[in-house]
Amino acid sequence: MDFFDFHHHKKNIRNGIYNLNIEQIPPDSPYSIGIHPQDIDVNNIEQQFLWMKNMIFQNCFAIGECGLDSLVSVDHKIQEEVFLMQIKIANEVKKPLIIHCVRKFYEVISFKKKAQQPMIIHGFNKKHQIAEDLLANNFYLSFGKAVLYNLSLQDILKNTPLDKIFLETDNENFNIEELYVKVSEIKEVSLEQLNEQILENLHRIKNG
């Protein structure tokens, strides 16, 4: 059985969404393209957006990573402007958004009303209340390696509807199948059911 890796940084993985780094050339497999908060070049934003728009080819599955990060040095207002511009691009090209968020979840939630396309928080590893508020605002949550050992996160996952879940390796070095096995145990569903549901979720976000 093949397992879809929702967000990864490895070009050798074809059954998933490769996160394209700034100024890279897209692969011939599904990828996401965006301007990560830490990659915003305040003196070169127009060129970064030109690169991004020129690289949205047939295999582009999503816009991202994009979002807000309280730990990077880029001014928060500039981060918000760049995030909003990427939301508008996603609306235009009808692609879902893969969101990077660090300590700015309620600000990200406030941007949801601007988005016409689905928004997925990648690498979710926060508290119950944040998960509940994101789900209440129709976000999807993508979970990574921390689910294998973080009991609190396992509990959050257990209470997250299957039709709002994705699974990813991000930049961690482990086999995505291990995560699928763990999640199938936590959710008390078969591997086949879990796999089918995630593929259904993918189809849903791809079609808005």
Image (tube, grey):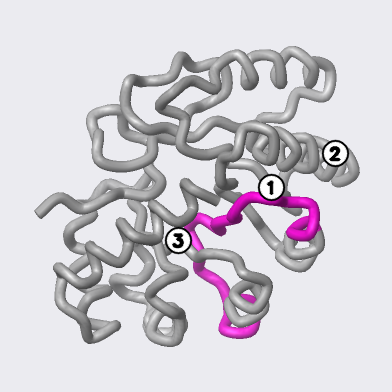
| 120 part of magenta stretch | yes
**What amino acid does circle 1 point to?**
Gly
**What amino acid does circle 2 point to?**
Glu
Residue depicted at x 62% and y 69%: 138
24 vs 124: above or below: above
Residue depicted at x 79% and y 59%: 113
**What amino acid does circle 3 point to?**
Ser
Query: Which stretch is magenta?
Result: 111-130
**Residue 107 x %, y %:** 80, 61
Q: Secondary structure at mark 3?
A: strand
**Residue 29 x %, y %:** 32, 27
Circles 3, 2 touching at the beta carbon (< 8 Å) = no
Q: Quadrant of the N terminus?
A: bottom left
In terms of image quadrants, where is residue 191?
bottom left
Q: Residue furthest left?
A: 1
Disc on res. 67:
1
Residue under circle 2?
81
Residue depicted at x 17% and y 58%: 177
**Residue 103 x %, y %:** 71, 63
Residue under circle 3?
142
